[in-house]
Image (cartoon, grey):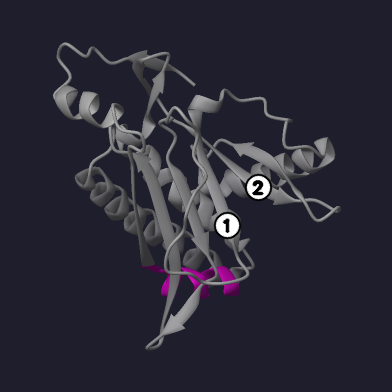
Amino acid sequence: MGRFEIDMNTFKRKAQYEYFSSLAYPYMGVTRDIDITELSYSIRQSGAPFFLTILYCVIKAANSVPELRQRIIEDKLMQYDSCMASYTVAIDDDTYCYCNVDCTKPYSEFIEYAKAEQEKAKACNTINCNKAEEEELFFVSSVPWFDYTSVIQPVPMPADGNPRLTWGKYFTRCGRTYLPFTILCNHAIVDGRHLGLFFEALSDSIREVNELLSKQIDG
């Protein structure tokens, strides 16, 4: 993936970047329930894979916000053109491996491509089989066994710039279907406004994929 260095002399958030970079724990995060009522119905009716469909929507939204593509590399602030998703895939010994996928492909191509990448990752059978640069990744986790109201994430020291995106088991409330969702970012790079842009983009990508699946069902 292409990337470029951000000029700190003209960077409008330089003061915020320097302040939060000086903190022992510079991360900020939020957990909220995402309405997936129509999309979950379309997934069931079409037979589309639930996790990969949600993954596609989430990473498409994340890539639409430039700040979520920025990383701290050797004390420099870099911005990627796009970032891949790195997520866990269960393997036979009741542990997991990591799988990296490019979510910039059209949804119609992405699903089969991602399935193939998962099989390659499972064949590797280790968490160390990682061919992408760590900085170009969104770190994704899923806990489909339960819903939740908050998450505590392991993070490195010193802090990195990779957003961490997590969701749990979907649930129903008042006739609607919701997905508990958490995003954790480095506050030196990302503010609440950027998270707001992400959630707006996530609503858009969920609606777009639902429309695609609805056409398949009707078609």
Residue type at numbered disc 2? Thr
Marks 1 and 2, Cα distance to the nearest angstrom?
A: 8 Å
Q: Position of residue 148 (x, y in %)?
A: 48, 69
Q: Which label was assigned to residue 167?
A: none
Q: Which residues are magenta?
A: 34-45
Looking at the image, residue 183 sits to the left or right of residue 144; the answer is left
For residue 176, which quarter of the picture? bottom left
Q: Which residue is mark 1?
A: 142
Front residue of this view, candidates 175 and 30? 30
Q: Residues within 10 Å of mark 1 (few under 14, many from 20)?
A: some
- In the image, what residue type sits under mark 1? Ser
Q: Measuring 64% from the left and 68% from the top, which residue is drawn there?
A: 47
Label 2 crowding class (10 Å Cα cut-off): few <14, some 14-19, many 20+?
A: some
Find residue 64 and report its horizontal and vertical position in percent: 33, 39
* Quadrant into which the C terminus falls: bottom right
- The secondary structure that most of the magenta stretch takes on is helix
Residue 172 covered by magenta stretch: no
Residues 40 and 107: in front is 40
**Of label 1 and label 2, which has the lower sequence position?**
2
Give the residue at x 68% y 29%: 130
Q: Nearer the viewer, residue 105 or 161?
A: 161
The answer to which of 121 and 153 lies nearer the viewer is 153
**Residue visible at 41% across and 17% down in the picture:** 3
Q: Disc 2 marks which residue?
A: 88
Marks 1 & 2, CB-CB < 8 Å contact: yes
